Each structure stands twice: as C-alpha cells, then as structure tokens.
Amino acid sequence: MSMEIPYTVDVRPDTGLTNGKLGIWLFLASEVMLFGALFASYVMLRVGAHEWPAGATYLNIPLATLNTVILISSSVTMVLAWASLAKRDFSRFRVFMGITILCGLGFLVIKYFEYTSKFHHGYFPATNTFLGVYFTLTGLHGLHVIGGMAVNGYLWGPGSALWKTDPVHFTNRVENAGLFWHLVDLVWIFLFPILYLL
Amino acid sequence: MGLETAVAHGAAHDAQHEELGFWRKYVFSVDHKMIGIQYAITGLLFLLFGFCLMMLMRWQLAYPGAALPILGTLLGEARMPGGTMLPEFYNELGAMHGTIMVFMGVVPLAVGGFGNFVLPLQIGAPDMAFPRINMASYWSYFVGGCVMLASFFVPGGAAQSGWTSYAPLSVIAGSGQTWWLIGMVFLITSSLLGSINFIVTTIQLRAPGLSFWRLPFFVWAQFVTSFLLLLAFPPLEGAAVLQLMDRLAKTSFFLPSGLVVSGQVLEVSGGGNPLLWQHLFWFLAHPEVYVLILPAMGIVAEVIANNTRKPLWGYRSMVYSLMFLGFMSFIVWAHHMFITGMGTTMAAFFQTTTMIISIPSVVILSALVLSLYGGSIRFTTPMLFALGFLPMFGIGGLTGLPLGLTAADIHLHDTYYVIGHFHYVVAPGTIFGLFAGIYYWFPKATGRLMNETLGKIHFAGSFVFMNVIFMPMFIMGLAGVSRRLYDGGASYAHAQPVLQWNVVSSWGAWGLALFQIPFIFNFFWSIYRGKKTDANPWHATTLEWSAPSPPPHGNFLTPPAAYRGPYEYSVPGAASDYSPQWEAAKA
Amino acid sequence: MSESHDTKNAHAGHADVDHHVRAAYYVFGSLLVLTGFTVGAYFLHLPHKLAITLALLIATVKGTLVAAWFMHLVSERKMIFWMLGLTAVLFFPLLLLPTLTVLDRIMLR
C-alpha cells in the first residue's frame, strides 16, 4: 500500500531537497554524535591513564594503511557508481557498485586477519584499556561497514529493479547510500591515525 | 494535481485501504494515525505499570519492613519473603519505575503518540515522510519494552542500579542489567528513527502557505524535541555498547583499577573511569528531560489558545525560547554531577549554563500565563489540565534553581528534594499536559467526545493528590533524607523528625490511583458511547480540525492550504470568534 | 515525469556529473597523498603533542575533502549546512568537556 508522499523523488522547491536526502543527512548527524561519544571516551580514558601503549605495540600499521587505501578507493567507486546512474548508464553502475562492495569485503577480510592475529597472541578486549578501545571502536565501525555493504548489495541486486520503473528515485537512493558509505570512510580516516599511529 | 484528481486519488486510496487485512490495518500499519494510537495505548499501559511499581514501593516507604497483605504473598518468596520487601526488590522496582516511566511511558506517549497522530494533521500532510520507518520505530519500541519487561523474570531480577545505571555497580550487577542495556538499544533506535521522520516531515511536508512562522507551537515543540532526540541519544547508545563490553567482554571502560567487590579485588584490566559513564549518560539524560517537557508545553499552548479564544501571547518569543532552550540543554548536563569532584572552573561553567537555561523556560511559562489575560476562558477538561500544568511546572522549575547552584546542591543533591523537583515537572507537569492532550484530541481520533463530568473528577482528584505526594518530599529533602533508601530513611537519626511524610506521600499515591479510574473508564467507554461530534467540536483554528473526525487514510478530503497564522481567535471584524487557518480570506 | 526532467536537464546534468567525477578523482589523489603524509609523519617520531596535532590536522583535511566533494557538501543546500553546523557545535563539548572536568585530578603526560 503506497501513499503519495510528496518530495520523495522531486525536490521541494523552497528547501531544494528530497525527503530521502534530508533524512540521510540527519541520520549521519546522529552517527557523528555516536562516534563522537566513543572518541570522547577514548580521550577521557587516555588522558587519565598512567601509561598508554603506542598503537604499533599491538597493531599492524601496514595492513591498516592498506585498509585505509581500500576504503578511500571504495568511496571513489561509490561516487562513480552514482555518476553512472546520473548519466543513465546502468551497466557501469553495476560495475562500480560491485567494486565498492568488494572493497568493503576486502576491508572486512583484512580486519578478520587483524583480529584473529590479536587473539592468537592473547590480546583480547579484556587485556587492557587500549585494546578494549581498539576492539570496540573498530568493531562498531566494522558493523557499519557491514551495514553499508548490505544496503549497497541490496541496491546492486534486488533493489535495482526500481531503475526500470523510476530511474530518478533509484539514482537518489544510490546517492543517499553513498553518503552513508562516505561517512564510514570518514570515520576510518580519523580512527586510523588515532588508534594505529598515536 | 487538480482538486478532482486529488479527491479521486483519496477515494482510490480509500478503496485500496478497504482491502487491507486486519494485520496490515491495525497491527503492521504504516498510517501515522494508527501508529500514533499504538504508541499512545502502549505508552499509557506502561505508565500504569510504572505507577503500580511505585505504589508497591510506597508501601515499603510508609511502613518499612511491614508485610504487605495479599499482594505481598503473591509476589513470591524470592522478592517478598513473608510479604516483606527485600532491599534488592526495592532497588529493582526503583530502577524499573524510572526507566519505564521515562523511556517507555512518557516519551512514547508524548512524542510517539501525540507527535505521530497530530503533527502530520497540523501541517496538512497526508502522512509522515517515511511511513514504513515510522512503523519500524514503533515495533523497535515494542521489542525494547518487551525486553525490559522480560528482565523481571531473569535470575537475579531486573536492573537494580537506578534508571541511571551508574558504574561500577551496574557493571557488576546481575543479568537483568544486560537486558536493560539491550532494551535501551531498541528504545534508542526507535527514538532515532522517529526523530528523523519528524524533522523531515516538518520541513518537507508542510501544506502550501504554511511557513515556519505559521506553524502551531505544538509543531515547533515536537520539532525541537526531535533534534534533542536525534543528537543526544547516540552518546547513550555508545555508552550502552561500552557497558555491554564491560559486562560481557570483561573490558574496563568504566571499572577503575583495584576495584574491590565483596572483599576481593576484581579480576579486570582496570584503568577505566566510572565518571565516563556518568558523562555519557547525562549527555543524553539532560536533553531527555526537555524531551519530557516540551511536547507537554506544546499541548498546553494549543489548549490555552483554543480555550481563551485569543492568540498566544508572545508566540515568537516562545519559539525563539524553544530553540535557545534546545541548544542550551546540550551543555548543562554536568549539573547532575556537581558532587563528583570536578574542579571549580568546570562546576562554575555548568552552573552558569544551568542558570541561563532557566530563562527560556521562564519565558515560555510566562507567555502561557500571560496568554490567559483578557481571555474568554472556557473551563473544559483539557483547559483544566492545561491550567493545572502552569503552577505545577512553576513549582517544578523554581525548585530546580537551588539544585543548579553548586553550593546549595551540596546539601540537596541525591535527597528527596531532587525527587520532589523532577516529579513536579514530569508528573503534575508533563502528565497533566498529556491528559489535556488526550481530552483535547480524543474527538479528532474517534469522532466522539470524552465525558466532561468524569474528566473534571479526574482532574480535581489528580491535582490534589499529586501535590499530596510530592510537596512533602521537599521537606524531607531539606531535612537531608537521601533518595533510593529502601526504608525511606527510617534507619537515620536525622530523618526521624520527617519520617511521617512518607506515610502522607504513600496515601497520596494510592489516592491518585483511585482518581485514575474515572479516566480509564471514560477513555474506553467514550470510544463506543461518547457523544458524537463533527470535525471541529472545539472551534479551533489549526489544520487538523479541518479533517474529518476520525480522518481517513490520507487525512484530508481536499488538499489543505494555510492562509493565516495558527491562533487567529477573536479577530476584530471577523464573523465568528475564530478564523481557521485553512479558510481563505473572504474578499 | 522523469522523462521531462531528462530532456530539460540532459546536457546540463551530464556536464555537471562529469565535473563532479573529475573533482572526485582529484580528491582521490589528494587523499592518497595525505594518507602517505599521515603514515610518514608517524615515522618522524615527533614529540607527543606535535604528533597528535599533526595527525588530527591531516585527518581533518582528509575528512573535509571527503565531506566537501564525495558527499557533495560544496554544492549542498543551506538546510543541510545548518544541521551539520549544529551537530559540529555540539560535537566538541561532548568530545572535550568530560575530560576537562577531571583534568585537574589526573596525571598529564
């Protein structure tokens, strides 16, 4: 049962926005506050700690650098996926969206190796506050990567049926999903130096 | 879209609507009105349940250690051996009373219920911007509520570390606390989804001619409230994740080094900070109290304008105050933490912002009071509750001032004075506002009026007994009686002179319960037997009153537009004492 | 409805998108370079406070590039800016005030 909600596809003239665009930005604002709280926790715990290990003591910097490059690349391919739709090239969209999803997968695979390596060495969240912060922050970020991949996967797969009936609506959806994906990248841009390099 | 198309569209939708089965129409509905009613009924049930928990506690407070007849034995030996309440059970009741009232009662009713039902109607929209997300937000709330209720039945019982769940106690507490944290995640998710919907709807779906400065104050209140929910809840979600990590993964975000529990040093890595929990919790919980009050202020404003037959006094100042209040609410939180040992600089900072935030509250309350001056007052039931709200919120607000001043707070913090203060704001404050809203919008939702006589009895009894319960708490607090004591202070010498007030408050609570019976009866009876009415029984000016009572799917028979401000009552030279927003100016 | 949009804005729209894509490539390149700086700065083994400042500075520049061009904020509506501005203003008290309340009681390195 669908209802004729205005400005789902067309922009409202005085705001220049679609409902979805405004909605996703509001959601991103809430995500900024979520990660903000976790960064605030990191600041308070670290400033209050007698000693705090350098990231390199426990963490693999080359792997994380690779992960950073992977995420940044996936952000670009996400833009290219949207751009393909904006130029009405659906098959190119599928290529770029597919690469974006694969990059996300690559990120998670590397994270898997990182985590298991820690466990193998006996480093667990319970071991000390640094590791507690590391696992929790990267874990929550990882959950967001999974969420983003799920949305992107849906848009690549079953959701792409909307392209045939309402291409503008579908393009907007991809753009909004892209905004979420860029936020995931943005959070990692801060997480990487803070956890690994400082 | 032409008028005929719109009407045909509406009719077509109605035809489609008739094909919806029971489950899609009443249970998994995406219609904001149905979702609003779901929120309201669920919220009211939880309010009743939370009230019952408190009535149980009040027996223990009035008669510490005495066996509770009948009910005491029903609750079992694990919680009330021989009918006398165990301290652990008292703590469970206390923590869950607060949690349920705030997160499962008041906010779902005030925001989920009233916001969902009224807001799209007041802005002339066919529904919320995201109907399916709206449905998801209700069910997330429902699941969270079920998780919270289920926690009573796990080994060790429900959460018992206060609704504030302070570490380290909450971290070492029984499994009920884990359920509390999981329940909170669902409740927070519900709020986040709802707030996004409200903000987008208000910005994007206003009818033609409805500029921001023509919005009813109720819409502004819900709009600001939604921003508070959107930006303040995520830190608590983060904190809940951290506490779950502490409890389940044995991290030490909130556990300091060398913590000793029952004579043994806790086997954790340590290095955590219990104050971190307090900061993250109160970062949400302070804006949360404004989430509790703003919708009620919105309702009271609507009811007062309508029942004085004149415009609100100072509408613009009220709206600016709302915005200022909303913003300031994010930077006052540590006034809940004055006694945690923070330095004088930071304490002074938070004291200053706290004093400043009282200004917009005073502006709003004063404007509401001034709105009465020169009015032609109709003492309908909604108006009685709205009028009752004013002095009650006044008392609540004024008693907050000593708490916001660090020096006075040293004596008053964590005493019954605090309980008296915040209950005045929430109970005869917000809840009176919500009752006003129920009586006011009941005819819109059902097409029938609630009974006025029963409503007046409900009001009179509630007003008297609310004061009987909460006024003595200031006396007890000033005498230094701490809160959360399961015997109400009976074992403390300094409490002895004021202990009798516990008995007074308890009988007040049980009296208050009696006077809710006419309301509960009235509510259900009027759905079927209430006096039938038309679209606008109150002769009100805002857009929702142009829709049929109850509104059909899609809300309006013809697409509405706004031609004037929201409170054009008693306009000089007009034919009647109200000029509705939706009626075009004649010639 | 989308067809009329297409015919009206086809050429202008495509040029717009191409511009956007080109900007994205430039940003991509900049981000890779800045990532190199981030890791490089680590190997400089700077004194602690300087290291933090530099790392956060570079991260902020990278974040701004992502927000401005990938997330298209450079050409976004006023409404969105207001929302984000409000969020930014509330972000910093959250980040800093808790630590400030305990600063005089904990050891600083």
Image (cartoon, coloured by chain):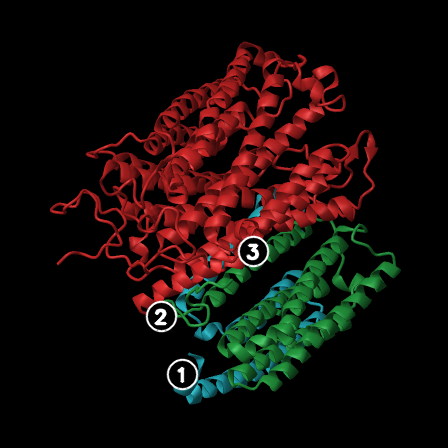
Query: Relative to A146, does residue B552 appear above or below in the rendering?
Result: above
Mark 3 closeness class: few <14, some 14–19, many ≥20 residues within 10 Å = many
Q: Give the Cα distance between marks 1 and 3.
A: 40 Å
What colour denotes chain C? cyan
Quarter location, residue B179: top right
State the SS at label 2.
Answer: loop
Q: Give the Cα distance between marks 2 and 3.
A: 30 Å
Task: State which chain disc 2 sits on.
Answer: A
The residue sitting at 28% across, 46% down in the picture is B315
Amino acid type for the residue under numbered disc 2? Pro
B54 with respect to B222 (left or right): right
Query: Relative to B229, does residue A31 appear above or below in the rendering?
Result: below
The chain whose colour is green is A
Q: Are marks 1 and 2 on the same chain?
A: no
State the SS at label 3.
Answer: helix
The residue sitting at 44% across, 64% down in the picture is A5
Mark 2 closeness class: few <14, some 14–19, many ≥20 residues within 10 Å = few
Q: Are marks 1 and 3 on the same chain?
A: no
The residue sitting at 72% across, 59% down in the picture is A139
The residue sitting at 87% across, 56% down in the picture is A122
Instruction: Please name the residue that numbered disc 3 is placed on.
Output: A33
Query: Relative to B481, does residue B20 appear above or below in the rendering?
Result: below
Place of residue B510 in the rendered image (x, y in percent of width and height, measured from the top left): 52, 19
Mark 1 closeness class: few <14, some 14–19, many ≥20 residues within 10 Å = few
The chain whose colour is red is B
Amino acid type for the residue under numbered disc 3? Met
Residue A13's disc number: 2
Q: Are marks 2 and 3 in contact (CB under 8 Å)?
A: no
**Closer to us: mark 1 or mark 2?**
1
B92 with respect to B398 (left or right): right
Amino acid type for the residue under numbered disc 1? Ser
Residue C4's disc number: 1
